[in-house]
Amino acid sequence: MKKSTTRVLIPIVGGILLIAAGVIFLLSNLGIITLDWEMLIGPLFAIGGLVFVLMFVLNTDGWWALIPGFVLMAIGLIIFMGEREVDLLEPWSGAIFLGFLGLAFFLIYISHREQWWAIIPGGALLTIAGVTLMTERELLSGMIFFLGLGMTFGLVYLLPKPAGRLKWALYPAGILFVIGVLMSLGVTKLLNFVWPVALLIAGGYVLYRSIRK
C-alpha cells in the first residue's frame, strides 16, 4: 500500500480508537456500565499490539512495527491469563513471550527476504521458548537448545536470500547439531572434549585457508 494512503489510514484508526475509549470512559463515569480494570488491562495491551501490526499491514516497509506489536500482544495475553488464574500460566508465560517475539522476526524475514538476519533471533527465541518448558529436564532442555540453534543456522543456509546461500552458516549448524545429538544419546561427558576439539578444527581451518591464500 502507498505511503500516502498509510499516512491517512493510521490517524483514522487512531482517532476511532480514541473516540471508542472516550465513549467507554464516559459511560463508566455516568454509571451506565462498570469497568473491570483488572480484566481490561490485558486486552488493552493486546489492542495496542494489533495497532502496530495494522501499521505493518498498511505499510510493509515498516517491518519494525511487528516487534512491538507482537511483544504487546504477548504481554496482553499473559496478563489476561494471569487475571483468569490460568493454571498453565507459570510454565507458559515465558514461552508465550519468547514465542511471539520469535514469530515476529520470522514474519520480518518472510515479508522482507533481504532481512535474512531475522532468522537467527527468530530461531533462537523459539528455541529458548521450547527450553523454558523443559526446566525440570536438564538433559532434554540442553538437547532442544543445541538442536534448535543448529536448525536455526541450517535455515540461514537453506532459506532463499538475495545474496544466495551462505556457506558459513553450515559450520555452526553442524557443530551445534552434533552437540545436540550427543546430548540426546546421553553422552554428556564427551561434551568436555567436543568444544576443545571444535576450536582446534576451526583454528586449523582458518590457518589452512590463510596459508592457501
Image (spheres, helix red, strand yellow):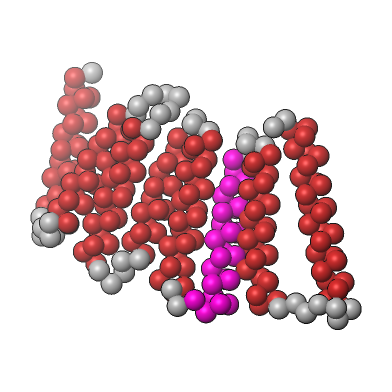
Residue 117 horizontal/vertical position (percent): 44, 38
Q: Residue at x 26, y 52 (%)?
A: 146
The residue positioned 60% from the left and 59% from the top of the image is: 72
Q: Is residue 67 left or right of residue 2?
A: left
Instruction: Confirm whether residue 195 shows in the render.
Output: no
Instruction: Please identify the dominant SS of the magenta region.
Output: helix
The C terminus sits in image quarter? top left
Q: 166 or 158: nearer the eye?
A: 158
* Residue 83 drawn above or below residue 68: below
On the rendered structure, is 66 left or right of 123? right
Residue 172 in picture, x, y percent from top left: 27, 41
Q: Is residue 67 magenta?
A: yes
Residue bounds of the magenta highlight:
63-86
Residue 56 rendering spot, x and y as whole percentages: 64, 42
Which image quadrant is residue 10 in? top right
Residue 59, visible in the rendered structure: yes
Classify 163 as above or below 123: above
